[in-house]
Amino acid sequence: MSNLSQAQRDKLPDSAFCGNGRSFPVIDREDIMKAVHAMGRAGSDQERAQIKACIIRKAKMMKAMDALPQEWQ
């Protein structure tokens, strides 16, 4: 994800994260792509589905749908 220091990460609102425990920060286009590639780290199918939905929602908000895999668009 973004190269954030722990202090910077701590300042982000919970809404900046797509995973449980403030994991999968998605604050810019690069984070979208990194989160997609890190999906295998999610614990369960349900968690992966929630993270995927969040990533897609954030990509739409950022007008960065082209940063998603083709099959997600």
Image: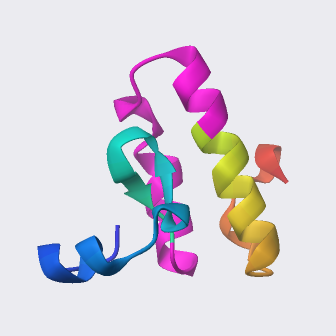
Rendered view: 25 above or below 40: below
Please tell me which residue lies in front, 39 or 24: 24
Is residue 56 visible in this depiction of the protein? yes
Position of 34 with respect to 70 (left or right) is left
**Residue 51 sits in which quadrant?**
top right
Name the image quarter holding the C terminus: bottom right
Please tell me which residue lies in front, 12 or 2: 12
Rendered view: 58 above or below 70: below
> What is the chief secondary structure element of the magenta stretch?
helix
Name the image quarter holding the N terminus: bottom left
Does the magenta run of residues contain 42?
yes
Rendered view: 16 above or below 35: below
Q: Which residues are magenta?
A: 27-50
Q: Position of residue 5 (x, y in %)?
A: 15, 80
Across the whole image, how many numbered discs are drawn on residues?
A: 0
Residue, x 57% and y 78% (percent of image)?
29
**Residue 57 sits in which quadrant?**
bottom right
Q: Position of residue 68 (x, y in %)?
A: 69, 60
Residue, x 24% and y 83% (percent of image)?
8
Position of 52 with respect to 61 (left or right) is left
Q: Position of residue 2 (x, y in %)?
A: 33, 76
Pick out the residue farthest to the left: 6
Rendered view: 9 above or below 54: below
